Amino acid sequence: MSSNQPDPLFWHMRWSVRDVVALVVTAVVLGLVFYLWDWAMQLLIRLLGEVAAGLFYGVWYWAGLLLAYAIRKPGAALLGELGAALVEFGLGTPLGMLVLVLGFVQGLALEVVFAWARYNYWGLVVMLIAGAMAGVADFAVSLVAPPLQLGLRSGGIIIAMFWLIVLSGAVLGGLVCKILGDRLLAIPAARNFLGTQLSQGG
């Protein structure tokens, strides 16, 4: 590549005002969704038990997945998850400051996958892997952090929770956000506002 030619990845990194607006809207809307989901999960845990409730963890990865899919910029997944976690924390989530830790590690896991895909491949496989990796990060925190502290549970529960959280991340996170993202970008006004350049895999 000639030294006079800019790296295409450099241009991916340039955030515009509309990207920041998308970040703020995502953080506020999904931060509220996450806050309500925190309370819904408390009920699901009581009704289904902690293990089965792992099937519903994928909702908590929507902010990073949707924002990254919509604007396709480095940092979008991390900032989306952190921004929503801040709103969630500000509203008084029952999980307390743990949501900030989770928002950071989940967003970071998503960034690793999207960086591996060079922010240019947005097909179903990439979204499934990203959601699954967010689930792995979520599980890692849950091993040591209250209220779950899965590391203190039996081996069977630990293994079951791992696979259910990863599956939820892939399906309820990655698959659902791929579908929602495609619906969003199919609206010309939304796509024009976001300035999304459709690339490999969608």
Image (tube, rainbow, N blue to C red):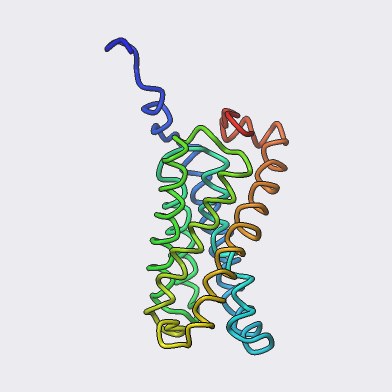
Q: Is residue 36 above or below residue 48?
A: above
Left or right of residue 148, residue 198 in this image: right
Query: Which residue ends up furthest to the front in the rendered image?
Result: 155
Left or right of residue 38, residue 181 in this image: right
Q: Position of residue 66 (x, y in %)?
A: 58, 49
Q: Is residue 29 above or below residue 190?
A: below
Q: How many marks?
A: 0
Left or right of residue 52, residue 1 in this image: left
Q: Position of residue 145 (x, y in %)?
A: 38, 79
Residue at the image point whose x is 52% and y is 71% from the top: 162
Quarter of the image where the N terminus is located: top left
Q: Of 38 and 17, which appears nearest the observer?
A: 38
Left or right of residue 7, residue 57 in this image: right
Q: Position of residue 185 (x, y in %)?
A: 67, 37
Residue 69 occupies which quadrant of the picture? top right
Q: Of 193 and 57, which appears nearest the observer?
A: 57
Residue 99 occupies which quadrant of the picture? bottom left
Residue at the image point whose x is 53% and y is 82% from the top: 156
Q: Is residue 94 above or below residue 76?
A: below
Residue at the image point whose x is 61% and y is 79% from the top: 41
Q: Of 1 and 46, which appears nearest the observer?
A: 1
Q: Position of residue 88 (x, y in %)?
A: 49, 69
Q: Of 149 and 36, which appears nearest the observer?
A: 149
Quarter of the image where the C terminus is located: top right
Residue at the image point whose x is 46% and y is 79% from the top: 95
